[in-house]
Amino acid sequence: MVEIIKIGLILTLMCGLFYTAGDVFIKQWLVKGSWLFYWLAAFMYFIAMNFLAFSFKSKSIAVASALAVISNIILLIVIIILAIKNL
């Protein structure tokens, strides 16, 4: 049982990671206008949703969705802080 919860947590965190990558690519698409970034974002979102769907097998939908959103927010904050430091 504990192993299933660990796998679900890893899948949920991977969802947050790929969702964040999709957010970064969407921002690049909006700034640069290159359709390559749009398609990369769509691919990242697709992978993220697959991780989230498989995490539903070991966690409730509400818990898995909340953890994915929280990990996405934390990663976006880290990226913003790193981007500000590089200015």
Image: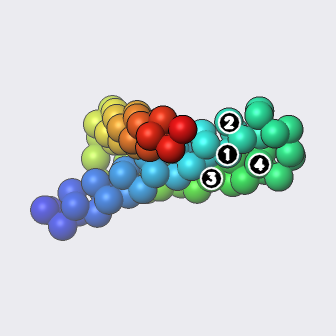
Q: What residue type is labelled 2?
A: Lys
Is 21 rendered above or below residue 32? Answer: below
- How much space separates mark 2 and mark 1, taking CA atoms? 5 Å
Which numbered disc covers residue 37? 4
Q: Is mark 1 on a helix, strand or loop?
A: helix
Relative vertical location of residue 39 with respect to residue 30 in this rendering, above or below: below
Q: Give the side of residue 24 with respect to residue 80, left or right.
A: right
Query: Disc 2 marks which residue?
Result: 27
Residue 25 is labelled as: 1
Between the C-alphas of marks 4 and 2, the distance is 8 Å
Are dots 2 and 1 in contact, CB under 8 Å?
yes
Could you tell me how many numbered marks the image carries? 4
Residue drawn at point x = 48 percent, y = 35 percent = 84
In-front residue for pair 67/25? 25
Three-letter code, disc 4 = Phe
Which quadrant holds the C terminus? top right
Looking at the image, which residue is at 28% across and 63% down? 7
Q: Which of 36 and 57 is in front in this view?
A: 36
